[in-house]
Image (cartoon, rainbow, N blue to C red):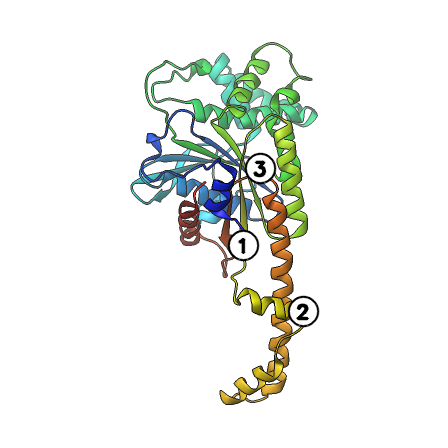
Amino acid sequence: MPTGTHAAARSGREHKLPGVSARDRDAEAVRLHVVTGKGGTGKTTVAASLALALAAGGGTVLLVEVEGRQGIARLFGTRPLPYEERPIADAPGGGRVCALAADAESALLEYLEMFYGMRRAGQLLTRFGAVDFATTVAPGMRDVLLTGKATEAVRRRASERRRGGRDAGGGRHVYDAVVMDAPPTGRIAQFLNVNAEVAGLARVGPVHNHADKAMSTLRSAQTAVHFVTVLEEMPAQETVDGIAEIHAAGLNVGSVIVNMVHSGFFDEPVLREAAEGSVDTGALVRGLKAAGLEDAEETAHGLAQEMSEHAQRASAEAAIRARLDEVDRPRMELPLLGGGVGPEELHLLAERLREQGL
């Protein structure tokens, strides 16, 4: 069953991670990686690992969190992140990952400062609760501000004049790639479709222009939406449905990343027999007795039961893989790691992503 780079080759749309510096990629390469997935699939872990993988070889990558959960800080073992782009981890080959915890209120204050020089007025609005009121009554505004912050980081160049967000022309991009730890699958299409969201807020003017700029980047070849799932029925179905919604919204689907995959312990013939309840318990008993194990019969029956359950799970997972094959997108798999995930495990997962290609 095709996975990883095999699935990418089958689809004819393989997106490689940089073998050398990310800055060597051409202008049409994916530079905004939006990572989504059903809750519980390890979306934030995959986003952080992807940022490390992209930075390897000397790249500079911005990892953006938009849900206010401080999941990135916990993974890297740091203090809660402020609304400020700051280095959070080094990558092999001289690369660097910076992180930002974006929130709508801070993004709006920055927006007012950049375009109107009104930061003090914005702070007064915040004090009276006007900003929170606006983003609560018009949730589309919140999405415009958050997506706008990420897409601005994609476009930003070293020589850019920040006031008004105008590009001065020269200079390389500040970030070789931006990775967004985005909202869950059920909300991702609405979150990214900021033009539709802002239509009820402003049809002309700076807010509309801000949304147009964000949407231009989101719809371009520079953006890909990656889906994180596990080999379970509901997350896989949400992934299939989410991919269809992203396609319908005119956005680009990247890869399907299957997370927390169990290791296989038995060959296919053994699994098939175990799934059919044909485990040779007698052979297990004899083997355990030969090893000098007490209570060999009871242990053998327990092992046979576990083998049967393992085989049934493997069969169900194979069926889910077959369903994911139907979406015809590159697919990678990351292993289940015991004992939790921290900085060391993130680097291990990043290396797995690099080995498989994205």
Between circles 1 and 2, the one closer to the viewer is 2
| Marks 1 and 2, the one that precedes in the sequence | 1
Residue 272 percent location from the top left of the image: 61, 66
Q: Is residue 326 left or right of residue 177?
A: right
Q: Is residue 88 above or below residue 170?
A: below
Please, what is the three-letter code of the amino acid marked with disc 3?
Glu
Please, what is the three-letter code of the amino acid marked with disc 1?
Met
Please, what is the three-letter code of the amino acid marked with disc 2?
Glu
Q: Residue at x 64, y 11 (%)?
A: 203
For residue 207, which quarter of the picture?
top right
Labels 1 & 3 near each other (Cβ < 8 A): no
For mark 2, what is the residue? 276
Relative depth, front residue between 170 and 71:
170
For mark 1, what is the residue? 260
Relative depth, front residue between 295 and 159:
295
Residue 188 visible to the viewer: yes
Q: Is residue 298 above or below residue 8?
A: below
Residue 233 percent location from the top left of the image: 67, 51
Residue 92 percent location from the top left of the image: 32, 45
- Badge 2 marks a residue whose secondary structure is loop
Relative depth, front residue between 73 and 117:
73
Residue 80 visible to the viewer: no
In the picture, the disc for residue 67 is 3
- Badge 1 marks a residue whose secondary structure is strand
| Structural distance between the alpha carbons of marks 2 and 3 | 45 Å
Q: Is residue 263 above or below residue 147?
A: below
